Each structure stands twice: as structure tokens, then as C-alpha cells.
Amino acid sequence: MNAKKANWAFLFMILSYLGVSILAAFLLPSAVNNIVVSNLLIEVSVFIPILIPMLLSGEKITDFLAFHKIKPGSVLMIGLYAFLTNPLQTLFNVISQFWVKNEVVSIMDNYQIVNMSFFPLWLSTGVIAPVFEEVICRGGIYRSYRRSGSAFKAMILSAVVFACLHLNFNQAAYAMVMGVLAVLLVEATGSLWASIIFHGLINGSSSLLMYLSLKAFPNILDTLDMLDHQMLNKLLLFDVGKELILAAAFTPFAFAVLVWIEKHEGREGTLEAIWRDRKWSPEPYINKKGKMKKDKLITVPLVLALILCLLVMIGMSYYLEQL
């Protein structure tokens, strides 16, 4: 599968996401109110458009997606990498909240997670979402873009796709960062399992902290809603300062861990090559008819998908502000 097909898949992902969301709201209201079923329904709706072209390509999917074994020591270090990169991701999350609401908090409030057990929440955010989203973004999308000749530009653009798939500005802000960090981990290990574990740890730990906070302070969201805009900005500014200091302190160590993983997996020089070879010209590939073509990353379906995402995100942001 190449970049052009991946871009078509991305466009159909957005259309499928929107279509399934609207239909589910009218036809399956009980499913929409169940966090596990609702999330699974959405993830499947965006997975099918990328699964079909992968199946039709004739390639062995597990090889194409890079489902390779990783060493136990690397798995442990992925946990440390997730911990050390968390402040950087949180920083972008907090910065986005100067303009938009915290989407995850709003979602959890809608599902009334304070009244449910932690297992459904963990299953939805810590297992279902990481598996599907990593197969889609660091698997199908990134591996297809990578064939264009530049791992660097494939990394950036696949991170943009990952961010846009969330269809809200808040999650998109830190998903973009997470997308880059996840690709670096995939390259360091040569395996998609690495980013699945990383994603699961980030989502699972964040959900646990939020769940425990809401359990301990069930009225905290109502209290925050009562604060005026100036006071909220002061709290956010404090959080930005705190996360900025932590990110500055922890991120260099995170990259040191990444280099250790790269060497532990016998892939020395892989990360350096991503930066070194960032400038490129589209490389030719052989299509099914045996003809050589230029594989370009930016195509019409990609542009249409990004415009559609932007319109939806602006509309959703305006709608939430009116609530």
C-alpha cells in the first residue's frame, strides 16, 4: 500500500467516523451511552477503511504493519519512556485549554465515570483505543507514507492524521506530539507492539489519575465551571509553567532512553537516519501493471480530509462553547 491509497483511506475514515456517529446517536442510543461499546464502534468505523486496502494489496499484513517481537528489556524501558514523555504531552494539552475545553474531562463527565467501575474505562481507553489507533496510524498510515522515501515527513504527516482523527482541538494538540513520539519508538524497536504498549500506558495512566481524582472529588468539575475566565487562565498558566519545567527536565532523558532501546534492539543509527534523510524527492515505486510512478505524500484526498476535519473541529468547538 502506498501514500495515495493511505490518503484515500484517511478520507473515508473521517466520513465513516461521522456517519457512524450520527447513525448511532439516532439508532443505537443505548450503545452511545456505554463507553466501551461506543468507543469500539467508533474505532471499528475508522479501522475498516484502512483494513480493506491493506487486504487488497496482497501483502502479508503482519509484516507490513511491523508486528515483530521486542526484547523484554525494551518493554520495561518503554514504560520509562512513557513516564518521561508525559509532561511534554501534558504541556500541549494544557496550552490548548486556553482556547478550548478539556475534551477528555468532558467525555468522562458525560459518561458519569464516577458512578462506574474502573475496568470499563481502562478497557476502552487503555486497550481498545491504543490497539486500533496504533494499527491505523503507526501501522497502515505511517508504513504507507514511509514508502515515499522520507521517514521524517512520514512521521510528521502520520502524526497530523492521528491528531485530526480525534476531531477536536484539545486532543489534537497533544495527539500530534504523541504521534511523533510513538513513531520514534516504532523506529527504535522496529515493531508496532512498542507504540501499542506506549499508547496503552499513556492512556491507561491518564484515565486512572482522572478516575481517582473524580472519585475523591466528585464535584470538582462543577467547581471548575463556577470559576470565572480570569481565574481559569491563572490556573492554566500555573500548570503550563509546571509542565514546562518538567518537560524540559524529563524530555532529554526520554530521548536517552529511546537511544538505549534502539541499541538494545540492534538498530543503531535508525533514529539518526530519520533526521539525516529528512530532505527527499519522491521515490518511484512499481505499481501492479509494472509501471514506475512517483509516490507523493500530499494528494487531493488528503487535502479534502484535512479540510473536513478542520470544519468539524471548528463546528464542535463552537457547539461546546455554547453549552
Image (cartoon, helix red, strand yellow):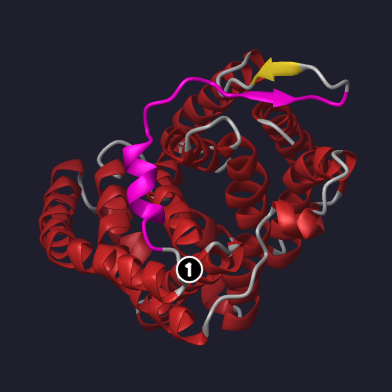
- Magenta stretch bounds: 268-288
Q: Is residue 117 visible?
A: no
Number of on-image labels: 1
Residue 176 in the image: above or below residue 299: below
Q: Amino acid at mark 1?
A: Phe
Indicate whether residue 167 is drawn in magenta. no
Q: Position of residue 59 (x, y in %)?
A: 83, 47
Looking at the image, which residue is at 76% across and 60% down? 62
Nearer to the camera, 9 or 57: 57
In terms of image quadrants, where is residue 301?
top right
Residue 14 in view, yes or no: yes
Does 323 sit left or right of 236 as displayed?
Answer: right
- Badge 1, how many Cα within 10 Å: few under 14, some, many 20+? many
In magenta segment, residue 272? yes
Secondary structure of residue under mark 1: helix
Residue 36 location in percent, x, y?
Answer: 71, 66
> Which residue is pictured at 65% across the width and 74% down the height?
123
Closer-to-camera residue (145/85): 145
Seen at 79% across and 39% down, the residue is 49
Q: Residue furthest top?
A: 300
Name the one closer to the observer, 172 or 27: 172
The residue sitting at 88% across, 20% down in the picture is 289
Residue 115 sits in quarter? bottom right
Q: Position of residue 63 (x, y in %)?
A: 73, 57
User: Quick check: 50 left or right of 228?
Assistant: right
Residue 90: % across, % down? 30, 58
Q: Which residue is mark 1?
A: 198
Please identify the quadrant where the N terminus is shown.
Answer: top right
Q: Is residue 4 left or right of residue 134?
A: right
Q: Tell me: residue 302, above or below residue 184.
A: above
